[in-house]
Image: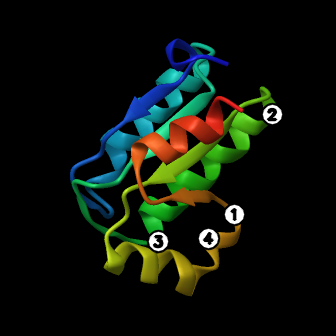
Amino acid sequence: MNDNMITVLTPRGRLDADGSRPFQTELQDHIANGRVHLLVDLQETRYISSNGLRVLLAAQKQAQKQGGAIKLCALSPRLVEIFEMAGFDRVFEIFATREDAQRAMNQ
């Protein structure tokens, strides 16, 4: 796979009840259009609630059904803590940098 087949999304702010809605729409649009190799760069995301986690999980399942995957990168220490508490660090591959995640996707 090359970088042209990877779609990078960069949600900003809070992925809570309000903030996760536009992100959900964006994810669904990409998957519906066959872009199922998604890299979510969370560097600009300050917080993620259970709503945001559900949005990611649903998109992961949809992408996997089509042979794709979602990989995450650049999580703040607080987001890492949230993902670990929810057990989502075992559901998603999480990388320190966008470059690391892109390399993993290209393998």
Mark 4 to mark 1 CA distance (whole Å): 5 Å
Q: Which residue is mark 4?
A: 88
Sequence-first disc among 4 and 2: 2
Q: Position of residue 76 (x, y in %)?
A: 31, 70
Which kind of residue does numbered mark 1 sit on? Val
Which kind of residue does numbered mark 4 sit on? Phe
SS type, badge 2:
helix
Q: Which mark is residue 50?
A: 3
Number of callouts in the render?
4
Q: Position of residue 25 (x, y in %)?
A: 41, 34
Question: In this image, 25 relative to 4: left or right?
Answer: left
Sequence-first disc among 4 and 3: 3
Sequence-first disc among 2 and 1: 2
Viewer-nearest of discs 4 and 2: 4
How crowded pointer 3 is (Cα within 10 Å; few <14, some 14-19, many 20+) is rated as some
Q: Quadrant of the N terminus?
A: top right
Sequence-first disc among 2 and 3: 3
Residue 57's quadrant in the figure?
A: bottom right
Viewer-nearest of discs 3 and 1: 1
Q: Which residue is mark 1?
A: 91
Which residue is more in the foreground, 33 or 87?
Answer: 87
Give me the residue at 63% from left, 35% from top.
Answer: 105
Give me the residue at 60% from left, 43% from top.
Answer: 70
Mark 3 to mark 1 CA distance (whole Å): 14 Å
Which kind of residue does numbered mark 3 sit on? Ser
